[in-house]
Image (cartoon, rainbow, N blue to C red):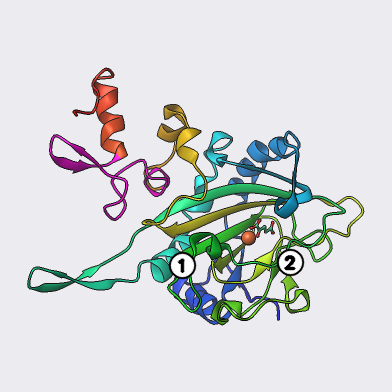
Amino acid sequence: MSLTALHVTASVEEVNAVIERDGGVVIEGYVPDDALNAIRDDMMPVYETVDWGGDFLGDRTRRFGCLFQYSTALSALVEQPHFLGAAEHFLRTPSKVWHGEHLVDQVPDYHLSLTQAIAIHPGQGHQPLHRDDVLLFNPHPGPQVRVQMMFALTDFTAENGGTNVVAGSHRWDSGRGPRIEEAVPTEMKAGSALIWLGGVYHGGGLNTSENDVRHGITMAFDRAHLNWEENHFVVYDRETVEALPPLTRRLLGYEEPLGYWGYVLVDGKIKGVGDLLARDRAAPNLSVPS
Ligand SMILES: O=C(O)CCC(=O)C(=O)O
Ligand SMILES: [Fe+2]
């Protein structure tokens, strides 16, 4: 079964209902054309500068990460209402905890754990079907910990390696393995995107075309108490971070602490990296008190 495609004018609730049912959805016209064009201009020249991935990453696949080095226009992919809406709905599920005599909601936050560009070239075989949330040791059945997005920078087709997805597999328990016949390639036009849950079996597709390279950009939101998939902190410099809009910066962990994780105590107070960046700007030689 192929995934349902909804136009970008669909409501967040409608999109979440389809994700709940099938594990994923395609959003047609995920970002406006001007954002697509800006991202394409910045990103397309980079793909050919990197070597083949090999193994699970693909022998005829080129990948690179920490994408804000190349384009600040990518924040349009992060701050897209359906992607954020799915993260809010599936990842911010409260737990009841006691604070003294009061039973209160503890609401998990989420962060932008991964940004990766993936070009699948002719000759690339099927990537083994997998769940990306196994990286986070998430049990099945279990909580939702990841919401992922794959943006089509160029058209995705059944011939050029459009992402294989097994609809409904987010409901399978850990004992059931996927078969390639159960997967359907995602077909979508450039500017559209696939959103799926971390528990859905999927994989990069087979590219049987003559010379059609499939260019995608994937991003993942994970619950903020889990580790980051990609270590962007050692790659981005201050100028890169400060050029980003505040929400993207926050989701990358450069503003306030996300759900009491990643904070620093400064003068006895809980602060985030954003406070340190601001303070360092005001007094560049001031170090964190010991
Ligand atoms: O490139 C794709 O379509 C999917 C790649 C993927 O699922 C992965 O590398 O984890
Ligand atoms: Fe994957």
Rendered location of residue 262, percent (x, y): 32, 46
Q: Please, is residue 44 above or below residue 144 in the view?
A: above
- SS state under label 2: loop
Of the numbered discs in the image, which one, if any, rests on residue 187?
Answer: 2
Magenta stretch: residue 46 in it? no
How far apart in space, not on screen, are marks 2 and 1 (Cα)? Answer: 21 Å
Per the image, label 1 sits on a secondary structure element best described as helix
Dividing the image into 4 quarters, which one contains the C terminus? Answer: top left
Residue extending farthest right: 210
Disc number for residue 277: none
Q: Is residue 214 visible?
A: no
Front position in the image: 183 or 8 = 183
Can you identify the residue that label 1 sits on? Answer: 86
Looking at the magenta stretch, what is its main secondary structure? loop
The quadrant where ligand 1 appears is: bottom right
- Mark 2 or mark 1, which has the lower sequence index? 1
- Magenta stretch, residue numbers: 248-272
